Image (cartoon, grey):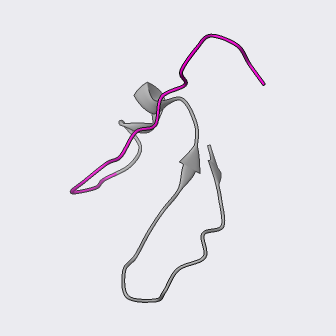
Amino acid sequence: MNNIDLISNGYQQHEVYCADSMELLDKVEADIIYLDPPYNQRQY
């Protein structure tokens, strides 16, 4: 699971990951999670 650097305005704490969402759910504790699933099966 790799962390991705995020440019922030400094007011909120953010964490961004590039990982399988189902595996990530067991590893991250959060109040709100935004998941952005792929639109198709192609790997770009």
Residue 32 on the magenta span: yes
Give residue 34's position: percent from left, percent from top: 35, 46
Residue 38 quadrant: top right
Instruction: Give residue 19's position: percent from left, percent from top.
Output: 58, 36
Q: Which is nearer the eye, 29 or 33?
A: 33
Which sits in the foreground, 31 or 7?
7
In the picture, which quadrant includes the C terminus?
top right
Measured along the vertical axis of the image, is residue 7 above or below residue 26?
below
Return the x and y of residue 1 as percentages of the image width and height.
62, 43
Q: Residue at x 25, y 53 (%)?
A: 32
Looking at this rendering, what residue extends furthest in the right direction? 44
Q: Relative to 5, is 25 on the left or the right?
A: left
Location of residue 14 by image quarter: bottom left
Q: Nearer the viewer, residue 8 or 40?
A: 40
For the point 66% across and 67% down, the residue is 5
Residue 37 position within the rendered picture, expressed as x and y whole percent measured from the top left: 48, 28
Q: Which residues are magenta?
A: 29-44
Number of dots carrying numbers = 0
- Residue 44 in the image: above or below residue 40: below
State the predominant SS element of the stretch in magenta: loop
Point 21% across, 57% down: residue: 31
Relative to 40, does residue 2 appear above or below in the rendering?
Answer: below
